[in-house]
Image: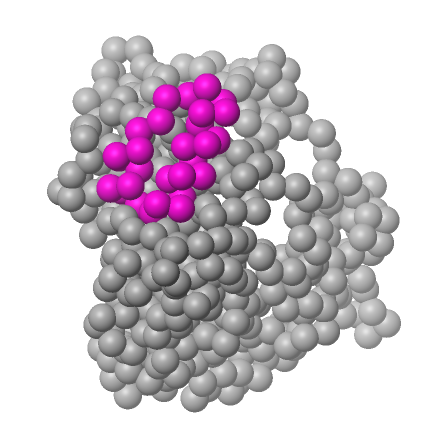
């Protein structure tokens, strides 16, 4: 069974905890009529609040809703997060749960995948900000750890990860220590792709605003260091030749533009991205099509065919590029010229959070792909602990 994890706030287990809360934990502001939930109650409390909100959205959309499967699934996920506290070096703040749930309540009550316009550069999502305070690690960067939940972070702009110390100067290549990554940095702030010698921290620029321009020539003690730099705007130079013959390359905003460097008439300036062809139109020379489409090459030796809409989960396919999930399962497929496989969910999918669909409300048994906020309905019903263990690749 392919596994699908929730949308993550970070890459650490603490980040997974918060990311899973970002994916699943929605609902009302109060978890208990008698006050904040104790550690052994938080899994049930968050599951109840999420499932109550989901029930309301499903009923408004006219979809059947399976409360039993919802509660079993969500409680299983959050119990694993609470268990990280029991193993030590992770602090649980019950007084932070209400704010976390309140942030989710504001979002889930829209019952829509449309969360409004994205935040400005440097902005941290309100859900991530509130929920980062629920579970907090206490192990400092460079200190030994056993799981990423233990790694300390100061805010939602930081992530901690517990991994083998593979730095060149490390004395042990088997010891696991905490590393910290700082994100959302703005233009002018120092960035670092790899830890400075003797340190355990990386720093990344907010991709909504710019990129990390590496220091030249590299510092041997800090080869990954640089400075966050704003993208060049459309019409501005992206290849700059200096008076000394040196050439500087400036990145264009990849969401809207590209650097015009091809051909004799290249302007070496940022230009708007071309409009890619849609369904029925010829693919570009490089085989590109608009978002949600793929280039239908056909059966060799046919030349590239027209662009076509990507296929939904359950439809037949020959290659993964044909599928909206980006995964064509060809296990047991035929080789006689017919379809080789079927589009299925993949662990690499990023689900469309907050989308209310029949399968996200019913927790299927027939659903096979990622649905509401990362939910991938299992192949059997009702849910069992064994199913969930396989599902979450535990």
Relative vertical location of residue 52 with respect to residue 290 in this rendering, above or below: below
Q: Residue furthest left?
A: 386
**The N terminus: image quadrant:** top left
Relative vertical location of residue 97 with respect to residue 314 in this rendering, above or below: below
Position of residue 137 in the picture relative to residue 366 (left or right): right
> What residue is rendered at 63% in x and 15% in y?
281
- Which picture quadrant has residue 37? bottom left
User: Is 180 included in the stretch rendered in magenta?
Assistant: no
> What residue is rendered at 57% in x and 47% in y?
106
Position of residue 387 in the picture relative to residue 210 (left or right): left
> What residue is rendered at 53% in x and 79% in y?
223
- Which picture quadrant has residue 374? top left
Relative vertical location of residue 302 with respect to residue 31 in this rendering, above or below: above
Magenta region, residue range? 47-74
Relative vertical location of residue 139 with respect to residue 115 in this rendering, above or below: below
Query: How many labels, in total?
Result: 0
> What residue is rendered at 41% in x and 17% in y?
300
Coloration mode: one colour
């Amino acid at each position: 069974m392919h596994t699908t994890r929730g949308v993550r706030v970070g890459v650490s287990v603490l980040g997974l905890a918060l990311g899973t809360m970002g994916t699943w934990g929605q609902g009302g502001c109060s978890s208990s009529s008698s006050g904040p939930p104790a550690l052994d109650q938080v899994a049930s409390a968050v599951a109840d609040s999420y499932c109550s909100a989901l029930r309301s959205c499903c009923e408004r959309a006219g979809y059947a809703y399976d409360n039993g499967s919802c509660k079993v699934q969500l409680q299983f996920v959050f119990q694993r997060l609470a268990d990280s506290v029991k193993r030590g070096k992770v602090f649980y703040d019950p007084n932070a749960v209400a704010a976390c749930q309140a942030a989710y309540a504001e979002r889930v009550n829209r019952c829509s995948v449309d969360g409004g316009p994205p935040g400005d550069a440097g902005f941290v999502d309100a859900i991530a900000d509130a929920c980062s305070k629920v579970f907090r690690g206490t192990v400092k960067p460079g200190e030994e750890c056993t799981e990423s939940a233990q790694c300390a972070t100061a805010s939602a702009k930081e992530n901690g990860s517990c991994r083998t110390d593979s730095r060149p100067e490390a004395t042990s290549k088997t010891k696991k220590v905490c590393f910290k990554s700082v994100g959302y940095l703005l233009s002018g702030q120092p960035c670092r792709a790899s830890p400075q010698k003797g340190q355990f921290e990386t720093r990344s620029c907010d991709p909504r605003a710019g990129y990390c321009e590496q220091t030249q020539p590299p510092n041997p003690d800090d080869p990954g260091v640089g400075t966050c730099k704003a993208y060049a705007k459309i019409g501005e130079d992206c290849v700059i030749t200096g008076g000394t013959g040196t050439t500087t390359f400036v990145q264009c905003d990849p969401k809207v533009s590209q650097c015009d460097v091809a051909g004799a008439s290249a302007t070496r300036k940022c230009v708007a991205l071309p409009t890619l062809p849609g369904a029925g139109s010829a693919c570009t020379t490089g085989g590109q099509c608009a978002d949600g489409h793929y280039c239908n090459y056909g059966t060799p030796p046919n030349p590239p065919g027209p662009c076509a809409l990507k296929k939904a989960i359950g439809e037949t396919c020959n290659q993964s590029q044909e599928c909206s999930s980006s995964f064509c399962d060809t296990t047991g497929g035929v080789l006689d010229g017919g379809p080789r496989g079927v589009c299925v969910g993949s662990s690499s999918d990023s689900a469309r959070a907050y989308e209310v669909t029949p399968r996200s409300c019913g927790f299927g048994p027939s659903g096979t792909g990622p649905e509401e906020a990362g939910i991938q309905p299992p192949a059997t019903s009702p849910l069992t602990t064994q199913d969930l263990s396989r599902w979450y690749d535990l």
